[in-house]
Amino acid sequence: MLGLTPFKVLTFDCYGTMIDWETGIFSALRPILAAHGKKISDHALLELYSELEASAEQGEFLRYRDVLHSVVRGFGERLRFSPTDAEVLSLPESLANWQPFPDTVEALRRLKSRYQLAVISNVDDDLFASTAPKLGVAFNHVITAQQARCYKPCMPIFELAEERIGVSREHWLHVGQSIYHDVIPAQSLGIATVWVNRPSPRPSAGAARAAFGKPDLEVSNLKTLADLAAATHARPETENREL
């Protein structure tokens, strides 16, 4: 069991970890596919989304809004239909309506009482600004792909976070839903990781690129993480050192 007392800062991926992005993605893409008479399983939709998003995030930096435009066009190319301009715009526009998981807000409030909290997210500043009020806590730091000019799993976004937060890596715990975007790059820098392996039609990956890694801790939701933090801090210090 990973002891949580050594950590001073918890950094969080946002979409998929705190925000239910699969429901958000379905809510935006399902109407488009239906309008063009296209049927695809939830698993296949998430897998194709992950491929198209990762492809658009490589090469010259694009705003995340433009990445999502590219994703919609990519669905059209793969499934042989031509999305309208309004349909292309609808995916990033829907993001402002994506909601937190039921456990997110209360878990963040509990964790905020023990740690500094920060966000490291593959998103534009203005898109995260539309999400932030839904999360119910004030984050000490927000680091976005727009600020770093690259998308996780790139190293510069984590290096920018380290510069902003100013904490040594042994006191930093990174929490994310994606092995590919979060666990592997953070661990490569010597940062401990929590994998939030939420239930999904595409198990262990969801809407992210599939990858294999060994997180320091795996939980199914943020409530479990908050419970573990509370239990760890409640133990005597000598017992904590044995974890």
Image (cartoon, helix red, strand yellow):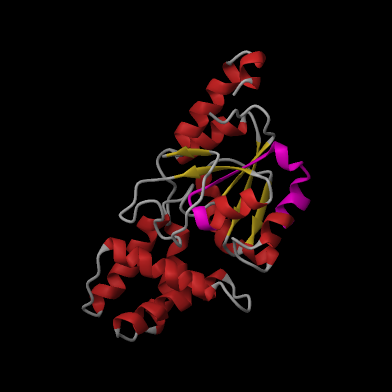
Is 200 situated above or below 157?
A: above
Is-magenta flag for residue 178? yes
Query: Going 24% across and 73% down the picture, which residue do you hit?
Result: 34
Is 127 situated above or below 191?
A: below
Classify residue 243 by image quadrant: top right
Q: Along the horizontal axis of the image, is 43 left or right of 204?
A: left
Query: Going 66% across and 55% down the picture, which residue do you hit?
Result: 143
Regarding residue 83, the answer to whether it shows in the image is no
Query: Going 59% across and 61% down the picture, which residue do you hit?
Result: 152
Is-magenta flag for residue 231? no
Q: Along the horizontal axis of the image, is 209 left or right of 147?
A: left
Is 217 situated above or below 89?
A: above
Classify residue 82 by image quadrant: bottom left
User: Whole-percent x and y of residue 239?
Assistant: 61, 15
Regarding residue 211, the answer to whether it shows in the image is yes
Classify residue 123 by image quadrant: bottom right
Is 129 situated above or below 54?
A: above
Number of numbered callouts drawn = 0
User: Whole-percent x and y of residue 125?
Assistant: 62, 62
User: Whole-percent x and y of residue 94?
Assistant: 42, 64
Q: Give the range drawn in magenta.
A: 160-180
Foreground of the two, 24 or 206: 206
Foreground of the two, 180 or 65: 180
User: Whole-percent x and y of residue 35?
Assistant: 25, 77
Query: Going 69% across and 51% down the picture, which residue do you hit?
Result: 189
